[in-house]
């Protein structure tokens, strides 16, 4: 893995924090645990991690508020840990910018798979950014900059993307006017047992549409092909 990836586990239950730390360390990650949001905030200001795992039931603040704050920092990804496994809770977490949502209790194998996937997405984006021909893409009135995960409109407006959203948009932009299945867009995560019921792709598409479409309810750029997947209908040019 080269230099170890740094993960912060923000979880007030000591047993769960210890379990998550031991499992991830056994897979080569450098892990530090925090029992509350205040201490985690201070640690992040000193040294940013590659990924944060955040429990929603923190003792000193609302976990969703912390997720929203962390999402604004593009340097690292965010995965929610929660005992609330309803569809509405998962969708809300993803809407707030989390890269993924893990329901307690969870299997260690699932935890590692989700963490690996989130880390891999960020590495893929970093690799794409390093390539001169795919660092920035223009479509419609927008320029997508992989370097800072932002969209900039011709009128100066800017929108930020999570790593998961940026990875999804990148796949669409690299295959314009082709239908891409949800399984393809899900990537390595498609082996998850809950894949047929997982709405993460749909939620991310919805979030991207809200940022780039004039009318997200009648999208002109990202089209839904019912029963098949999604299609990017616009023209794309790659800027050097």
Image: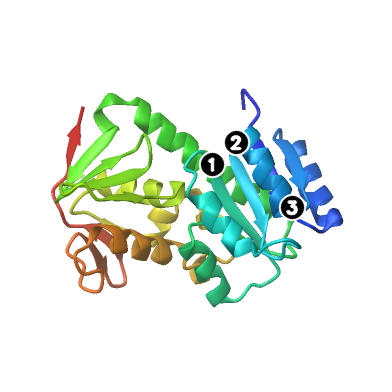
Can you tell which mark lies on residue 43? none
Mark 2: give few (<14), some (14-19) or many (20+) Cα within 10 Å.
Answer: some
As drawn, is 29 to the left or to the right of 87?
right
Residue 134: image x %, image y %?
28, 33
Give residue 217's quadrant in the image.
bottom left
Whole-percent x, y for residue 79 in the image? 59, 54
Q: How many marks?
A: 3
Query: Along the line of sight, which residue is nearer the eye, 240 or 223?
Result: 240
The residue nearer to you, when weighing 219 against 26, is: 219
Among numbered discs 2 and 1, the one appearing first in the sequence = 2
Give how far across and how far down residue 198 sits, in percent. Answer: 51, 67
Percent across and percent down for residue 111 are 68, 52
Q: Which element is circle 3 on? A: helix
Category of crowding for the residue at label 1, using alpha-carbon neighbours closer than 10 angstroms: few (below 14), some (14–19), many (at least 20): many
Q: Residue, x 21% and y 67% (percent of image)? A: 219
Q: Is disc 2 in contact with disc 1, using a CB cutoff of under 8 Å? A: yes
- Measured Cα–Cα span from mark 2 to mark 1: 7 Å
Side of 189 where 25 appears, left or right: right
Which residue is painted at 30% across and 66% down in the image?
Answer: 228
Secondary structure beneath disc 1? loop
The reply to whether the C-beta atoms of the residues labelled 3 and 1 are less than 8 Å apart is: no
Q: Which mark is residue 108?
A: 3
For residue 48, the mark is: 2
Q: Locate the C terminus by quadrant.
A: top left
**Residue at image mark 1:** 76
Kindly identify the residue that appears in the image at 47 percent across and 49 percent down: 72
Q: Secondary structure at mark 2?
A: loop
Lower sequence index among marks 3 and 1: 1
- Camera-side mark, 2 or 1: 2
């Amino acid at each position: 893995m080269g230099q170890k990836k740094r993960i912060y586990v923000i979880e007030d239950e000591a047993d769960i924090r210890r379990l998550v730390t031991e499992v991830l360390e056994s897979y080569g990650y450098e892990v530090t645990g925090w029992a509350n949001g205040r201490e985690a905030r201070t640690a992040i200001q000193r040294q940013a991690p590659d990924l944060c795992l955040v429990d929603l039931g923190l003792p000193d603040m609302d976990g969703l508020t912390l997720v929203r704050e962390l999402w604004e920092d593009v340097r690292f990804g965010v995965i929610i840990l929660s005992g609330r496994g309803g569809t509405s809770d998962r969708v809300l977490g993803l809407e707030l910018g989390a890269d993924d949502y893990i329901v307690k209790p969870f299997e260690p194998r699932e935890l590692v798979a989700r963490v690996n996937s989130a880390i891999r997405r960020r590495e893929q984006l970093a690799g794409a950014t390093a390539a001169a021909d795919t660092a920035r893409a223009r479509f419609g009135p927008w320029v997508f900059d992989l370097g800072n995960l932002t969209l900039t409109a011709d009128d100066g407006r800017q929108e930020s993307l999570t790593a998961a959203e940026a990875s999804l948009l990148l796949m669409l932009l690299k295959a314009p006017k082709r239908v891409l299945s949800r399984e393809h867009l899900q990537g390595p995560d498609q082996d998850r047992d809950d894949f047929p019921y997982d709405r993460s792709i749909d939620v991310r598409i919805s979030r991207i549409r809200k940022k780039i479409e004039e009318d997200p309810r009648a999208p002109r750029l990202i089209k839904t092909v019912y029963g098949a997947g999604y299609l990017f209908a616009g023209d794309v040019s790659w800027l050097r």
